[in-house]
Each structure stands twice: as C-alpha cells, then as structure tokens.
Amino acid sequence: MKLATQDKPFFPVPLGEKLKAVRRLGFDTFEIDGRVLVENLSEVKTAIKESGVPVETVCGGYRGWIGDFDQEKRATAIAEITRILQALAEINGRGIVVPAAWGMFSKRLPPLVPPRSEEEDREVLLDSLAKLNRVALATGTLIYLEPLNRYEDHMLNTLAAAGALIKAGNFAGVKLTADLFHMNIEEAGIERSIHEAKALLGHVHIADSHRYEPGTGHLDFVPIFKALKDSGYQGQMAFECRVLGEPAAEAYRRSVAFIRACLQEAGF
Ligand code: LER
Ligand code: MN
C-alpha cells in the first residue's frame, strides 16, 4: 500500500522539487493531472528519476466525460484518456481515475430530469469503457472507474453500481476507485461496501467527512482501513482534499502522520 497525494497550491515548482516535497511530507507517490503528464512527459520522467518518487496514478486533465451527453465531447474524453494511458505506460504508471461524468448532471438538483434514459446512460458507459478497456489492456494500465455522490454525477453513485457495469462488460482493464468522501454520502455502510467490492477495488481516494484533510472531520478511518486490509487491498490511497489547517503544509504533514497511525492500527 502506498500513500499518494494530488497537487497542492503550496507545493513547490518545478516538478522535481514538487516530488521531493511530496516525499518530505510523508507520501510515497504523486497522483498527477493527465494534461500535465502528457504535455510534460520528458520533464516528468526526469523528475521521477532525480527524486526517486514515482508518479503512478492520474486524476483529471482531459476534456469531456466518458458518459458525456454530447457525442463529440465523449469521443474527446476517450481520445485524451487514451493519450494519458499511453504516457502513463512510459513511466510504469498504474492507472487513471475516471468518473462517468463530473458536474454534468444531478437528478437531485433542478431541472431534475436528465436528457437521457438510464438505459441509454448504461449503453454509453459500456461503449466508452469497452474502448478504454482495450487501451488499458494494450498499455498495461488500468481505468479506475469512480462513483461520485448524487450531486456530482447522476449515473454512478455506488461501488455496487459501478462494479455491476464492469462485470457486465467483463472489463479486465477496469477497476474501481473507492472515494471515501463520496462513499460517506452514498454507501449504507462503507466497510460493508468495501468487502462486497473487494475483487474490483483498484484505487482509493481519501478525505475526511467534510473533504478537508483527514483527521479534521468525523470519519472513523481505522475500521475503514481494516476493511481494506481484510479485503486484501494493496493499491494506493491518494489524498484528495482541501486543507483547513494553517500553515497548510504543516497541517498536511500532520494529516499524513495521522493517516499513517490509522493505517498501522488497522494492520497495514
Ligand atoms: C470528484 O469529486 C472526485 O472525486 C475526483 O476524483 C474526480 O474524479
Ligand atoms: Mn475522487
């Protein structure tokens, strides 16, 4: 299990210094933006070599969504994710976090009724995932399909719903992202859902209950980590949160120490 972080405004530049700072804060690896990776591939390679800090996962950095209502934007998403996976393969990366869509539509906010049926949503997602599954298998990378909460996406909100889609398509190159912030809203029981989805778990996003740095909210991380440990989870856990404490870098360092203690207590 490796602890990862996404980029933060208080991290230094250039990328080589950023990766060194990430390690000093207590992380093992960096989750990069897809566009940053593709547009700076040789700099990323040098930074990894010089810092010894791997870059193994991607989140964001492409236009459109795999479940986009607009066919052209959906094709753009598939093409750009393909380029990101090709670049990721060159740095021995693992995979990219991909939601069905983010901020495109919510059935819980006006106008409430989406312009496409659930059956059509499903067909569109199966088609996009079939294409990206082929790319993942060809490049030795993975798609980490990410259910989001009901206010951020109307198509996939639970691990079970996303897992059913992966099974329906028999996609060996598609796994799940378990994002604790979304799960805290959508899953009846976080630990139970982790156990039920264990065969498909590929990646984890962590934040506290209010999506600030772990340790500042009311999420109980130890039983969740125990569920991951008991499920045989060996992938990454990437911080995806805002930072409440000040100064931010110190608050972030405290949060990493807090999470490492929780991981140890859970048996990692
Ligand atoms: C969005 O809320 C999220 O969790 C990101 O990982 C985007 O996929
Ligand atoms: Mn996430």
Image: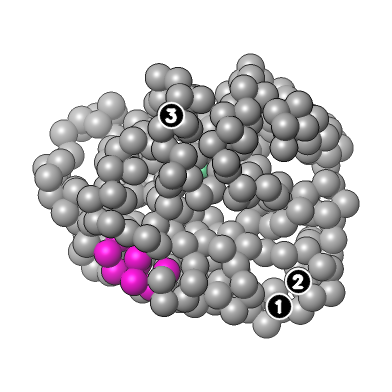
How crowded pointer 2 is (Cα within 10 Å; few <14, some 14-19, many 20+) is rated as many
Confirm or reject: label 3 Cβ below 8 Å from ligand 2. no
Confirm or reject: label 2 Cβ below 8 Å from ligand 1. no
Q: Quadrant of the C terminus?
A: top right
Please determine whether, in this image, residue 224 is positioned above or below residue 95.
Answer: above
Q: Is label 2 in a helix, a strand or a loop?
A: helix
Q: Are marks 1 and 2 in contact (CB under 8 Å)?
A: yes
Q: Nearer the viewer, residue 72 or 94?
A: 94
In percent of the image, x 75 and y 68: which residue is there? 15
Give yes or no for residue 132 being in the magenta stretch. Answer: yes
- The amino acid pointed to by label 1 is Lys
Pick out the residue farthest to the bottom.
42
Q: Which range of residues does the magenta coloring cover?
A: 129-136
Figure quadrant of residue 73: bottom left
Q: Nearer the viewer, mark 3 or mark 1?
A: 3
Q: Are marks 3 and 2 in contact (CB under 8 Å)?
A: no
Figure quadrant of residue 163: top left
**Residue at the spot of label 3:** 193
Please determine whether, in this image, residue 39 is positioned above or below residue 93.
Answer: below
Place of residue 155 in the rendered image (x, y in percent of width and height, measured from the top left) = 27, 41
**Residue at the spot of label 2:** 48
In percent of the image, x 19 and y 48: which residue is there? 121
> Can I make out residue 67 in this image?
no
Looking at the rendered structure, which numbered label has been put on residue 171?
A: none
Please determine whether, in this image, residue 44 is positioned above or below residue 251.
Answer: below
Please determine whether, in this image, residue 119 is positioned above or below residue 18.
Answer: above
